[in-house]
Every structure is written in structure tokens, then in C-alpha cells.
Amino acid sequence: MSKVKVSDTIQLEIMQLPPAECSPNARVHWVVKKRAGDNFRDEVFYLALVGKKDALELGSTFPWEKSELRLTIIVAQKRRRDTDNWLGRAKPGIDALKLAGLIVDDDVEHLTIAKPVFVVDKTRAPRTIFELVRGEK
């Protein structure tokens, strides 16, 4: 089951990894890539709406003008990971944050994306945590 936490940050915990089909190195048919990306985007989108609702109840306003995104990716095996490819894989989820109205835009003026953190944990994997931290106005 996916979870949402809200405070000065909105934390969305998705019980899957960003789709491999969305990696810049993936060699898949565009329909396969689109379906995988849409499914991941939808999962993040609906969790973002829940997080937004909870934050509105606590007095927050949206969209956030500036924010930082921190990605934590929980995997079962320790191996080498390419940051650029994982950010590409997470792009549909990042787009969902804008689609849900949490952020103004995902360009560099409005959103800073931290280097993804990888955690090896066989009992919790697979999991992706999007932590959106509100920046200064």
C-alpha cells in the first residue's frame, strides 16, 4: 500500500520502482514506454492529490513556487546505478507533481532535483519515495 506524509514537506511513497522502460537507455517500442510511464505517473499523481489535500487542511497553499525534490529509491540488490538513467525513469512521476498542482513547473527555476539516494533493503524493496520540500517564495 502506498503512503503519504505531509508537514513542511510532502512525502509520497510508491510501492514500485520508476519504470525501466522510461530509462533513456531503454530500447523499447514507444507504446510500451508510454504505458509504463503513464501507469507510474498516475500512481504518483493520485498520491500527490492526497498529499495536497492533507497539506491544504494544514494551511498550505499551492502550487509551490520553488521546491526541492529528493528521491529515495529502495532496491533489493546492491549494484552500480546510473543517476541520469534513474532520473529519466522517474520523469513521469516528476511530471505528476506538476499535473497535481503541487509545483508551478519542473524547470530549473522552480524545482531543484537532488541526486537520488539508493537504499538496499530486501524487505522494503521495491519502493520509490518522492520527498518534495517547499522552498522560499
Image (tube, grey):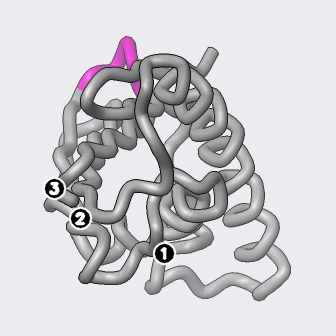
Q: Earlier in the sequence, mark 3 or mark 1?
A: 1
Q: Which residue is mark 1?
A: 23
**What type is the residue that disc 1 sits on?**
Ser
Please tell me whether mark 2 or mark 3 is closer to you in this view. Answer: 3
* Residue drawn at the location 46% of the way across and 32% of the way down: 12
Q: Nearer the viewer, mark 3 or mark 1?
A: 3
Tell me, for residue 113, which label it has, or none.
2
Identify the disc placed on residue 110. none
Instruction: Name the kind of residue labelled 2 in the image.
Output: Ile
Tell me the CA gap for discs 2 and 3.
15 Å
Q: Which residue is mark 3?
A: 136
Residue 78 in view (yes/no): yes
Residue 124 painted magenta: yes
**Does the segment drawn in magenta span residue 70?**
no
Image spot of residue 123 (x, y percent):
37, 12
Picture quadrant of residue 10: top left
Q: Earlier in the sequence, mark 2 or mark 3?
A: 2
Q: Marks 1 and 2: which is nearer the front?
A: 2
Residue 90 in view: no
Q: Which residues are magenta?
A: 121-126
